[in-house]
Amino acid sequence: MNFKIILLCFLITMNIIAQEKLGQINDPDGYTNVREQKTSKSKIKFKVYEEEYFYFEELANENWFKITNMDGDSGFMHKSRIKEITEFKFKGKTYKASEIKLKIRVKNIGETFVRIIQIKNEKTVCDAFVEVYNEKTEKFDYEYIDPLGGSAGISFLEDAVPNHLILTKHGSYDGRTIIVNNKGKVTEMTGGSISKIINNKYLLNFEECDLGYCGMSVYDLQKDEIVLTYSNFIEGLFFYKNKIYIHLQNVEGNSKEYVGLDLKNLKLKEKEILELSREHYFEDWLRFELKDGCLCY
């Protein structure tokens, strides 16, 4: 038999890297240490607590398994402290762990904490849920998210604006943004995946479509309220001579008509005829945490 084939068969038999499985800890202490190396004498990287989910890989002929928590941090845990979860229940539904990918993130701001649950599966592509806990509980459900623009799920920004947590739903034509301030106020608004902060005061949110934007909203970060909403199709956003211009849906066929965004008076200005091109596209957007935050795509 060819040596390469023998080697390949050996690696498959050893099952060096197994399929990830969903797990929780099995520890009477209520937490388990995760180590840098496969030994109890190795440095502790982080801890996993009761009720937390994580993914683990069974390594053949090993007593220590590689685990990855919901924040994407990895390390090693002794197999005696791991119990496999074959299914879990959420919002009245039972999910088989082998058929889905789960991500749960918890973020704190002031005395408020926010839990973001995302479930990738073949039946609904992506389900995402946001739960905000303070003096009262507020919940937002985004089911059957269509991965338009190549992404689907919830992403977030913690440090873009002081004292605010910004969460954005990516995918589908119904873009949404949730803003939570450090006093626990929660606001849901139109627009998602494309955002920009102007003068450290206004947050502009744009809702992506295949050929442009489906609408926009403007949030005053100092007053903590929505101050402008536009719900019609927008072909493009431009920055020209230090001003923001919006190319609205062209009904009359004049591709040179634009309206200015007047943030001082919080309105859209009258139409202007401008010679704008691709070099004037407004591209300085906030960079949302897509890789680790947005689960499904």
Image (cartoon, grey):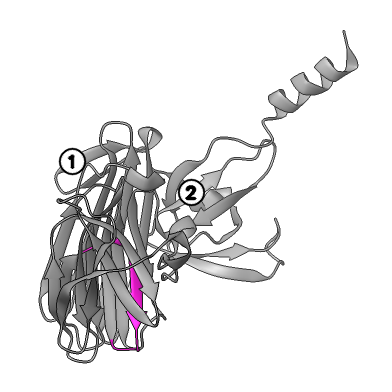
Image quarter of the C terminus: top left
Is residue 27 at least partly visible in the picture?
no
- Of helix, strand and loop, which one carries label 1? strand
Which residue carries the number 1 mark? 93
Q: Amino acid at mark 1?
A: Lys
Write the start and end of the magenta stretch as one range: 191-201
The percent coordinates of residue 173 (x first, y second) are 22, 48
- For image coordinates 57% across by 48% down, the residue present is 79
* 28 sits to left or right of 167: right
Which residue carries the number 2 mark? 55
Quarter holding residue 31: bottom left
**Mark 2 or mark 1, which has the lower sequence index?**
2
Image quarter of the N terminus: top right
- Using the image as rendered, state which of residue 226 and residue 25 is in the foreground: 226
Pointer 1 local density, CA inside 10 Å: few below 14, some 14–19, many at least 20? few
Quarter holding residue 3: top right
- For image coordinates 44% across by 54% down, the residue present is 26
Q: Is residue 200 magenta?
A: yes
